[in-house]
Image (spheres, rainbow, N blue to C red):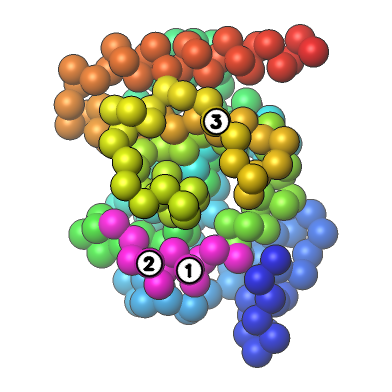
Amino acid sequence: MQFDLFDGTQNKILDVKTYAEFKQALAQSNCAKCALSDSRRHIVVDRGNPNAKVLMIGEAPGENEDLQGQAFVGRAGQLLDQLMNDIGFDTNRDSLIINVVKCRPPENRAPKQEEVNACRPFLQKQLALTKPKIILLLGAVALKHMIVDKKEFSMREEAGNFFDHPEFPGVKLMVLYHPAFILRDPRKKPVMIEHLKRFKAYLDQIERT
Ligand code: URA
């Protein structure tokens, strides 16, 4: 846990015992640890069920998320919900969905490294409080920032494979195409559906054991 002794607001948010307390504290915090606070309307903490076995991690809130204060509620989120629903997975019941950064970058640009770093303690607190069994990394930006030793990679090779990582003991990770990428290139949809079926088969297996 990264504690900054001089940042009272951050420490108050991190010094909570339950996920519900964390969510409320962060959402209401008016956090200004990075420049994204200048233009955001809401701090987008998550969407879904913090008790679920599956944690999905996306990139950053977009316009709809910023307006509504909920993760993945725009077009990409609706596609994600639909693809997941087709494999019998309810994103709100069966997963918690979060982002690498909690505030919308202007013009939906990728978050900068310093923004990711500033937000990192909140993401780590989410991991610590939810203890997921499976983490789905949605897209290249999530992969790059969550698996820091992955410097160069191709999504075509990474997407759809389960892997372990020493930073996440006891957790299976899988990289998926970001649903916004599927919206831009629908030819990739059948491949993503195959990856989702693989994920669901693994989830069903751990539910049985
Ligand atoms: N894209 C993301 O990566 N996250 C969201 O919450 C919405 C769109």
What number is the disc on residue 58? none
Per the image, the residue denoted by label 3 is 163
Per the image, the residue denoted by label 1 is 117
Quadrant holding the C terminus? top right
Looking at the rendering, which quadrant does residue 123 occupy?
Answer: bottom right
Secondary element at tag 1: helix
CA gap between label 3 and label 2 equals 24 Å
Query: In the drawing, does residue 52 fall left or right of residue 165?
Result: right
CA neighbours of label 3 inside 10 A, class few (<14), some (14 to 19), many (20+):
few
In contact (CB < 8 Å): disc 2 and disc 1: yes
CA gap between label 2 and label 1 equals 6 Å
Identified at 33% across, 66% down, the residue is 112
Looking at the rendering, which quadrant does residue 114 occupy?
Answer: bottom left
Report the image quarter containing ligand 1: top left
Give above or below for 43 relative to 152.
below
Q: Find residue 89 and report its horizontal and vertical position in percent.
A: 55, 17
Per the image, the residue denoted by label 2 is 113
Q: Find residue 111 and report its horizontal and vertical position in percent.
A: 34, 61
> What amino acid is labelled 3 in the image?
Phe
Compare residues 15 and 136 and report the one nearer the observer.
136
State the extent of the magenta-drawn residues as a range: 110-121
> What amino acid is labelled 1 in the image?
Asn
Query: In the drawing, does residue 93 fall left or right of residue 79?
Result: right
Q: Find residue 54 and report its horizontal and vertical position in percent.
A: 62, 31
Q: Is there any visible trace of residue 23 in the rendered image? A: no
Q: Does ligand 1 reach within 8 Å of label 1's beta carbon? A: no
Please check the rendered image and state whether residue 144 is part of the magenta-colored stretch, yes or no.
no
